[in-house]
Structure formats: C-alpha cells, structure tokens
Amino acid sequence: MVSVGNKIQMVEQRFLRNDLPKLDVGDTIKMMVKVAEGDKIRLHPFEGTVINKQGAGNRATFTVRKISFGEGVERVFPEHSPVIESITVINKGIVKRAKLYYLRDQVGKKARVKKQQTQ
C-alpha cells in the first residue's frame, strides 16, 4: 500500500529539474528567463543577488534582487520552473544570514555582498 504522501512525491518527482546549479543566499546570478511577446518567446537576461530561498522539492522558490535605473527590483522564481532557461552563478557571496532583506534599505556600496575568493 502506497501512502498519499508517497504518491504526491512520485508525481512531483517528474517535474524536478536537475540541470540547474546549486544556489545559495548571497550568490550573484545571471539567468535567462523566457518572456512571451505575442506569439513569440524570447530570452530576457535577469542578473542580481539571491536574497531569499524557501521551500523544498517542487515548491522551492528563490528571490533575486537587482538595481535597475536606480530602483530596486525583486522577482520570485520557482526553482524548478520551465520559465527559467539557464542560471549561471557569477559570484559566491559570503553571508551570515538566511534572508538578506536588509539589502532593501542599503544604498550604493553598502548594498553589496562580499565575494568569496576563487582560486
């Protein structure tokens, strides 16, 4: 006998993506997002800092924040969404918190996250 929880897990397993890199809070990422314009689909770049991760499995989401023309822009993406074409991690960030909501109040150089040294 298979429990209801196991049935849900088996159905969700089909929709999980394994082609995306591991993201952590504080990472600077560049992603290509599919945008529908009329009957065409084009790729739109979105580059910013991951300020939040929550959920697990098929319900996992992450929030990306960027500054565009002096205004802060935040978008929440489902981690396993078909809208995401690709994600590349530009910089790994050094942070001591799970949620970087304090970046909303920072301006200029204070709004940066320290980068991890790569060898």
Image: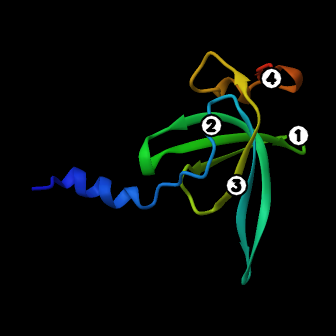
Measure how far apart labels 4 and 2 are at the Cα level.
Answer: 16 Å
Quadrant for residue 37, please give it: bottom right
Mark 1 or 3, nearer chain start: 1
Mark 2 surroundings within 10 Å by alpha-carbon count, few (fewer than 14), some (14 through 19), many (20 or more): some
Tell me if mark 3 has few (under 14), some (14-19) or many (20+) residues whose alpha carbon lies within 10 angstroms of its own: some
Q: How is the image coloured?
A: rainbow
Question: Percent from the top left, x then y, of residue 90?
Answer: 79, 37
Residue at image point 53% right, 54% down: 17
- 4 vs 1, front mark: 4
Mark 1 vs mark 2: in front? 2
Q: CA distance from mark 1 to mark 3?
A: 26 Å
From this view, report whether residue 67 is shown above or below residue 109: below
| Amino acid type, callout 2 | Leu
Determine which of the numbered discs, if any, sits on residue 93 in the image: none
CA separation, marks 3 and 2?
A: 13 Å
Q: Given contact means CB atoms under 8 Å apart, are the residues at marks 3 and 2 in contact?
A: no
Q: Secondary structure at mark 1?
A: loop
Q: Is residue 107 above or below residue 23?
A: above
Q: Amino acid at mark 4?
A: Thr
3 or 2: tag closer to the N-terminus: 2
Sequence-wise, the earlier of marks 4 and 2 is 2
For label 1, the residue is 70
